[in-house]
Image: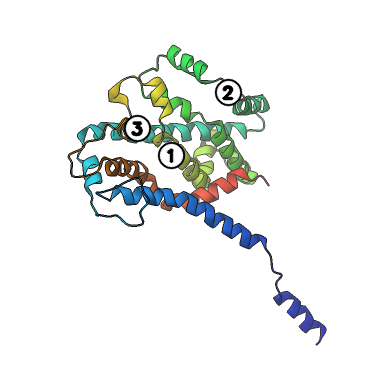
Amino acid sequence: MSDNQTLVYKKKKKKFKVFPIVNAILFIIIACAIMIPIYKVIITSIDAYSSYDFRWLPQKFSWGGYRAIITRSNLYHPFLISVITTIIGTFVGLLVVTLGGYVLIQWEMPGRNFFAYMLLFTMIFDGGMIPKFLVIKQLGLINTLWAVILPMAINVYNLVLMRNFFEGIPESLFEAAQIDGCSPMGIFFKIVLPLSKAALASIGLMFAVSFWNDYTNFKLYINKNNLYNFQIQLRSMVVDSDIPNDGAVNPTTISNAATIVAILPFMIIYPFCQKYFVQGVNVGAVKE
């Protein structure tokens, strides 16, 4: 056998590696541990005779649980509150992190490092629940949706991700824009934002999920029933057994249907944003 043939043979011969197999098995187990409870909730939500036992298929298929949720008029307003806070909160959150991240990449700005360290300091040391409540109260935001939106919109972790993403934009683009007479805000709107669609989509999705699933802030800062969101109402249905029961459908079926309705919007949205989510988080989190 010649030297060239030996070299080709060595290239074709692959070493057996244990790690990829173990890694695949581990992630399959983790995926099953995550999906089986979700599958159980889905099956129970369409089973008229649902129980706490695990079933692979419904004993009697029925849309009664979803029908009970959709036709219950007192769920419409909390659902609308969740939609409003999610849309406004995501917009405000993206506005804060994009402007904040853009400011922190201005190398000539006096005190840039000081402000960056102060923001990072808040990620390590948190004031706590009571100081936050007192601040919200002194600002007069109790029983307003801004008490829920503003604390979650100011997210330092997302701001750092956005800043790292902005730092990955070639500096030559900024210099070329400055030579052409573009102002700092012009550079932000005409260059930075158009190149940051992946980061905006991924961080916006994280904001939206946080606002949609928010329960704690509504419980702390909201005392009016007409300002409660869908998660508060869902908790009342599941935990406090505040479930409409006409005898045709098991209350457990209705509570599981309410859970699926709560997670359904982002189950639909996420597949469309997945590629931006992965790309945005990777670029924003890895510093070259």
State yes or no: discs 3 and 1 in contact (Cβ < 8 Å).
no
SS state under label 3: loop
Give the mark, 3 or 1, whose residue is nearer the N terminus: 1
Image: 111 above or below 273 = above
As shown in the figure, which amino acid type bears the numbered disc 1? Answer: Val
Q: Which residue is mark 3?
A: 239
Question: Tag 3: residue type?
Answer: Val
Amino acid type at image mark 2: Asp
Q: Is residue 131 left or right of residue 60?
A: right
SS under mark 1: helix
- Residue 121 x %, y %: 63, 25
Quadrant in the picture for residue 167 = top right
Q: Is residue 42 visible?
A: yes
> What is the x, y in percent for residue 186?
51, 37
Quadrant of residue 146 within the rendered picture: top left
Q: Residue furthest bottom?
A: 1
Residue picked out by circle 2: 126
Q: Does residue 104 lie above or below 50 as drawn?
A: above
**Colour pattern:** rainbow
Residue 230 percent coordinates (x, y): 32, 34
Can you say whether 248 is above or below 232 in the image?
below
Q: How many angstroms separate mark 2 from mark 3 (CA)? A: 30 Å
Task: Please rate how many residues cluster around mark 3, counting C-alpha atoms within 10 Å: few if below 14, some from 14 to 19, many from 20.
Answer: few
Which disc number belongs to residue 209? 1
Task: Give the mark nearest the N terminus, 2 or 1.
Answer: 2
What residue is at 25 percent from the left and 45 percent from the top? Answer: 65
Q: Secondary structure at mark 2?
A: loop
Mark 2 closeness class: few <14, some 14–19, many ≥20 residues within 10 Å: few
